[in-house]
Each structure stands twice: as C-alpha cells, then as structure tokens.
Amino acid sequence: MIDVSPKFNTLRYAQAEGKIFARPETIDRVKNGRVPKGDVFEIARSAGISAAKRTSEWIIFCHPIPLDWIEVHLQAGNNHLRAEAEVKSVWKTGVEMEALTAVTAALLNAYDMLKPLDDSLRMGEIQLIRKKGGKSDFRETFDRPLRASVLVISDSTFAGTREDKSGKIIREFLQDQPVKVEIYDVLPDDETRLKNRLLKLTDQEKMDLIFTTGGTGLGPKDVTPEATRQVIDKEVPGIAEAIRRHGKDRTPYAMLSREVVGVRRHTLIVNLPGSSRGAKESLEAIFPGLLHAFPMLWGGGHKLQE
C-alpha cells in the first residue's frame, strides 16, 4: 500500500456511473415491480451502499476509509438500467474506488435478479464521472517561481560543530514546488542578528518567502519567534496552527513548539522546527495551501473552489 501518513485530511468526493443493458420487456418488468426476486431498484441500491463501505476488503491496495456519505441511484431507460453512485469522506485519500465499487455492486445485483428473465444482459460503461479533493485541487501556478530564502538558526551549526539537516530537507522539498531557493544561510541563535537578516531579506532583497528552521522551542536561546514578531506587519496564525496540529498527530512534543508565521509587506515568513523530521512534516502540512497566500498578498483575493 501507499504510505498516506504524511497527508492531511481534505473533503473527498467522487461520482461514478454504469449501465446494465437488457431487453425493453425486461426493463418494463423492473419498472412495474414484476421481477420474481423483488424490487430491483431498492436491492441494487442497498447492495451498492453496502459494497462501498467494504471496498478495501477486495481492492488490494485500497485504504480503509471512514465514509461520511454514500448514495446510489438507479434509473430505467428503454433498454438499460443506469446506476449512479456518489461518495464523500473527509480523509487522506480519494474515494473513486468506493464510488466505482458501489456502481459495480449495484449492477451485479441487478444482473443476478434479472438473469432468469433475460439471457441478453450485458454490463458496461462503468466509469468515474467526477472527483474532487486532495492537494491537486489547491495547487497554484505563477508566472515566475517564488523567490525564497532558507535560514538555519543554530549556534552549533553556525560554529561548524553540527551538520545542517533541516535546511537541506527544506530546500529539497521546495524543488517540487513553484519556488526557487535563492538564499541559504546559517545564523546563530541571536535575536538582533536574525531580526536584521529578516529585514534585509524583506525590504532589500524583496523575497517572496522566507523559511527559518530552529530556535522555536523553550530553550533559553530559542529566540526565532521573538525576532520574527519584531519584523512582521501581521501574523498569520492559521499556518502555525496547521503546523502544530499536524505535528501533534505524530508526536506530543509538537505542542512545545512556538512557530510564528507572518507577513511583512509582500513577504511571507514561516518559522519551522529545527528537527529534520519536524521541518519535513510541517512542510507537508502547509503545502500547497500556503501558496494561496501570494495571490492574496498581490491583491488577487481568493479564487473560487467548487
């Protein structure tokens, strides 16, 4: 199975359809309730709903998903029955397979009920109609890559006695984003020095995005949040909350982190934890949604999501 533990929950939706083709007289018997085995519409609908909830039991690489809503509709045409399924879940993976399974199960049960009456039955046109949810729905595109800086805040790394890992992980992660890291630097745990560096990057270098890593804990020299607050014009608490919430699901120590995220002019400054694991998990929590900050900063507002 694919490891989905790094993902965060989003509203997932999928819609699928399929048909069973039969003689017109068979379809008439379905419409008029004259099928010996019972009501084809209700039994097929119930079968589809039940099957969707058990999709992972027979689709080998399908994750068990807590489904929030399933609906199956059947409609009769002249020479076919059409099954349509809709599925919703707030989860880490899509629900396409659940919708397709619901349609397939509904049609199979209809087939079973009608096969004594019609030897021309044929199932077909099973397909996904629509799906929504997941990171791909929230990606942003820009005319140019966002200009970014990565600052590693650590006395030991600055002194050369400790190898930087978190800064390198941040740079590696950003390679898959519409972001170009132009500046990578290591600074000591010095509030004034960090503040001045941030001011230069925002006011002179005109960076779009600045990531700091380190100095966000409870230690006597952890001053990254304090330096950041001296620089930003407005705080963006939701991004920091998303980082800590995502982290708290993975380690209780996340509640001890004090990341600050804020804006100075058109620059977004994001504090990340100093650990390599914490930095990576934090980036997974906030991308790609974080990128929507820039159309807002540039006056574009929110784009509409269906």
Image (cartoon, rainbow, N blue to C red):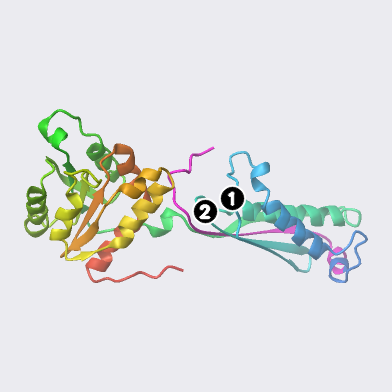
Q: Tell me: 35 left or right of 157.
A: right
Q: Earlier in the sequence, mark 1 or mark 2?
A: 1
**Label 2 SS:** strand
Looking at this rendering, what residue extends furthest in the front direction?
220
Q: Amino acid at mark 1?
A: Ile
Which of these two is toward me, 128 or 60?
60
The structure residue drawn at horizontal position 63% and vertical position 52%, both measured from the top left corner, is 98
36 lies above or below 217: below
The structure residue drawn at horizontal position 86% and vertical position 56%, both measured from the top left corner, is 113
**Mark 2 residue crowding within 10 angstroms, few (<14) / some (14–19) / many (20+):** some
Magenta region includes residue 27: yes
Q: Tell me: 183 left or right of 176.
A: left
Q: Amino acid at mark 2?
A: Trp
**Residue 33 percent across, percent down from the top left:** 88, 69
Provide the residue designation for mark 1.
65
Which quadrant holds residue 27? bottom right
Magenta region includes residue 248: no
Tags 1 and 2 in contact by the CB under 8 Å rule?
yes
Provide the residue designation for mark 2.
91
Q: Which mark is residue 74?
A: none
Which quadrant holds residue 114? bottom right
Q: Which residues are magenta?
A: 1-28
**Residue 138 percent across, percent down from the top left:** 39, 59
Which of these two is toward me, 119 or 210?
210
**Label 1 SS:** loop
Could you tell me how far apart the alpha carbons at marks 1 and 2 are, in whole angstroms? 7 Å
